[in-house]
Amino acid sequence: MKLSDTQRVILSAAAQHEMGLARAPKTLPAAARNAVFRSLIKTNLLTEINAPREHVGLGWRQDDDGTWIVARITDDGLRAIGIDPNAGDAREEDEQSPEAIARRNAERRAAAEA
């Protein structure tokens, strides 16, 4: 899939977030943000989860009961920006768990600094 610059920026930022959560650039208007997020979710590059309490500010929409929803990068999203989600040791934990994403992001940051 060919990514737009905006999609690439959003996915790259999510890949660096400790929980893999996406954030739109501050200069991106809300309507454009919503369109980009919907597109990334539809193509399984992002997935929606209930916002963790400490990251409610990253919510991009609210569901019918007012719960903030955040978008989290998927393994397909990581691959789309050239990151192998399975790099390193074999995974015993759920690949999409917040802990697994945080660990992978920490490993990537450490490798980038080396």
Image: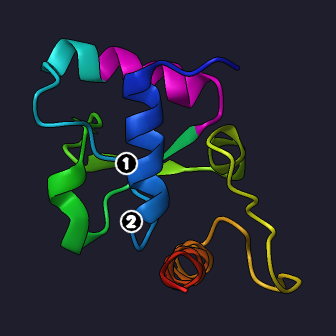
Q: Which residue is mark 1?
A: 22
Cα distance, mark 1 to mark 2?
8 Å
Q: Amino acid at mark 1?
A: Ala
Residue 19, x across and y down, in percent: 44, 69
Q: Which residue is mark 2?
A: 17
State the extent of the magenta-drawn residues as a range. Answer: 34-45
Q: Inspect the magenta stretch and tell me whether residue 99 lies in it.
A: no
Left or right placement of residue 48 versus residue 31 in this view: right
For image coordinates 48% across by 82% down, the residue present is: 113
Q: Is residue 37 visible?
A: no
Q: Please tell me which residue lies in front, 105 or 68.
A: 105
Q: Inspect the magenta stretch and tell me whether residue 44 lies in it.
A: yes
Residue 10, x across and y down, in percent: 38, 39
Residue 112, x across and y down, in percent: 53, 75
Whether label 1 touches label 2, CB < 8 Å: yes
For image coordinates 64% across by 50% down, the residue present is: 78
Q: Is residue 71 visible?
A: yes
